[in-house]
Image: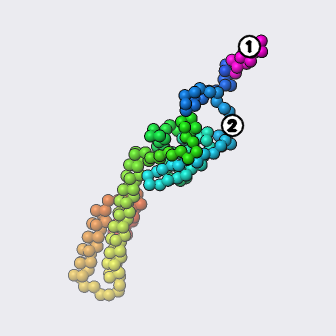
Amino acid sequence: MKRFSSSKRAVNNVVKGEMKWELRPGGMLVQKRDMGDASSGPMIKIKVSHGSFHHDITVPAQSTFGDLKKVLVQETGLEPKEQRLLFQGKEKDDEECLHMVGVKDMSKVVLLEDPASKERKLEEMKRNQSVLKACEEVAKVRAEVNALEGIVHGGTKVDEKELLGLTELLMVQLLQLDTIEANGEAKVQRRAELLACS
């Protein structure tokens, strides 16, 4: 009779949704242990290799690969969506638990940067370099115009031919400013120089 009541209790737990199951790495289905907060469980050290860099990361054994990615942000500067984690040659999803796929203390995980993320960073770097180059070109023209203004405003007497030559040089500098392709801050600087020279 006791046996019946205990099995009835187990059935009630399943019906109420209190009993949860987990699949172990060996393929065995067992009742999931309620560990409470994952950080209160045992800690494991994982060796993460990222290109030529190696990081030793300590995380709770019950963590997910998504949790590991969040920790790796501080080490690598890569956001979780830019990271791909491989364990035993297979890419792992963020929801997968480390202990469920066999990650143990001193296991090795490979971190790869998402190719699309790499491409975006490369494009941004090229864009920043073009803005920097445009700013340098604007500064160079500004220096040449300032030198011309120094000659004109220097108080020395300038004959008409020299004045025409200086005016011609100023026009060349204005044309150079006009040919500089610029975006963002460099565009604002170019516009300010054009207004100052006009």
57 on left or right of 164: right
Q: Quadrant of the C terminus?
A: bottom left
Q: Earlier in the sequence, mark 2 or mark 1?
A: 1
Is residue 41 covered in magenta?
no
Q: Amino acid at mark 2?
A: Gly
Q: Amino acid at mark 1?
A: Phe
Q: From the viewer's perspective, is residue 103 above or below residue 5?
A: below
The image's colour scheme reads rainbow
Which of 126/154 is in front?
Answer: 126
Q: Quadrant of the N terminus?
A: top right
Tell me which residue sits at (66%, 21%) in the image. 14
Q: Tell me the residue that label 1 is attached to.
A: 4
Q: Residue furthest right?
A: 2
Tell me which residue sits at (35%, 84%) in the image. 154
Tell me which residue sits at (67%, 19%) in the image. 15
Dot 2 alpha-carbon crowd within 10 angstroms: few under 14, some 14 to 19, many 20 or more: few
Q: Position of residue 150 (x, y in %)?
A: 35, 81
User: What secondary structure is marked by label 1?
Assistant: helix
Q: From the viewer's perspective, is residue 31 above or below residue 64?
A: above
Disc assigned to residue 36: 2
Q: Residue furthest left?
A: 161
Magenta part, dominant SS: helix
User: What secondary structure is marked by label 2?
Assistant: loop
